[in-house]
Image (cartoon, rainbow, N blue to C red):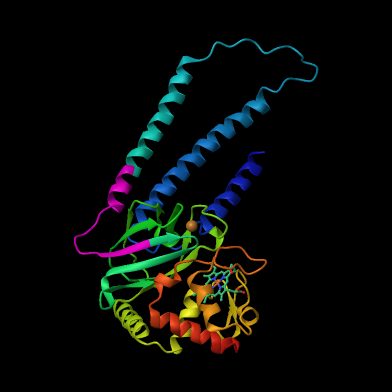
Amino acid sequence: MVLVGVAVGVALALVAVLIPWLPDAASEQAGIVDSVYWMVTIICVLVFAAVAGVSAYAVYKFRAPPGDTDDGSPIHGHTGLEIVWTIIPAVLVTAIAIYSGVALGQSDDLPADHRVIEVTGRQFTWTFTYPDIELEKGRPLTSGELVVPVDETVEFLITSEDVIHSFWVPEWRMKQDAVKGIVTRTIVEPTKIGTYPVICTELCGLGHAIMRSQARVLSASDFNAWVKEQRRLAAEGASVQGTALFTAQCGSCHTLADAGTTMEVGPNLDEALKGKDAAFIRESIVDPSASIAEGYQDIMPANFGELFTDPQLDGLVEYLLEATGGG
Ligand SMILES: [Cu+2]
């Protein structure tokens, strides 16, 4: 029995150590958050092992022999034991509270030199606004994907236009609710170049499961190139940008052969837009609730009219007309 116990223990320990339980840690804040997580997990594992071990031993040792129908002998408790099992949890819980407080304080540290990005949740998309970057005169850069330079601290100011959402990039370990009427914040310094999912983690309605975007962490020079590209696209009204816009903003829900997208959350536009005119397409984008395609639910984001500049919108409509052979 001891041998079996040791073998099971070794096997479980290997599973525990060899599986990468947490996603890549890609921010300055991830280290301390993970250490809190592992501290709590290890305490829980030890407490569980102790309780389960004593229970198993008691079941084995004090088992009633066959035919024994007596009540057990009455017990009046054990003061020493009660003191011990009150003090140990009290110490553990206090330690967790103190360590979490320290972690919270550290991850809330905002250096004077930082970038601000506004995050707006809306059923069922994210919009990211860069108040310090001018796209064109008097209009800040906005984007449906989150693009940030590596190794720069970002203060995210988060809000919602409707119900409660929650902004989360697992690899950064920070998560914050988006609530209409108030601005919450979270601070992240991304430390690894890469592409990570942005996830809504607050059940927010029919399209909650597809309320995702991506966070791209770029080198400083790639980030500047991206900003330049966004300015160029905004200035241009041409349909070249149609494909890029479509892939970035619409491809997560719609199939369109010309853009190479294959998702089917919304209607297949190759079929749905056959023979449709520019006015219909424009209304579908700006005011998607005006008419709901049969068999689908009203989950298409309603803020594209604000997100896109007029030339962008014209370009997109023109592109869709060309791509689906309508007109
Ligand atoms: Cu949401």
Task: Identify the residue shown where x is 55% and y is 37%.
Answer: 49
- Residue 260 spot, x, y in % from top left: 57, 83
Would residue 147 be found to the left or right of residue 271 on screen?
A: left
Q: In the rendered image of this protein, does residue 108 appear above or below residue 119?
A: above
Is residue 22 visible to the viewer in this orientation of the structure? no
Indicate the quadrant where residue 29 lies.
Answer: bottom left
Would residue 111 be found to the left or right of residue 50 on screen?
A: left
Q: In the rendered image of this protein, does residue 43 appear above or below residue 200?
A: above
- Residue 278 spot, x, y in % from top left: 53, 83
Between 148 and 45, the one nearer to me in the picture: 148
Between 215 and 283, the one nearer to me in the picture: 283
Task: Identify the residue shown where x is 57% and y is 63%.
Answer: 298
- Residue 231 spot, x, y in % from top left: 32, 82
Is residue 247 visible to the viewer in this orientation of the structure? yes
Determine if the magenta segment contains residue 109.
yes
- Residue 117 spot, x, y in % from top left: 31, 65
Q: Residue furthest left?
A: 112
Task: Identify the residue shown where x is 55% and y is 50%.
Answer: 13
Q: Residue furthest right?
A: 67
Would residue 250 be found to the left or right of residue 74 on screen?
A: left
Task: Identify the residue shown where x is 67% and y is 38%.
Answer: 1
Q: How many marks?
A: 0
Q: Quadrant of the C terminus?
A: bottom right
Q: In the rendered image of this protein, does residue 246 appear above or below residue 157?
A: below
Between 34 and 12, the one nearer to me in the picture: 34
Indicate the quadrant where residue 271 lies.
Answer: bottom right
Determine if the magenta segment contains residue 285.
no
Q: In the rendered image of this protein, does residue 195 appear above or below residue 260?
A: above
Q: Which residues are magenta?
A: 101-119
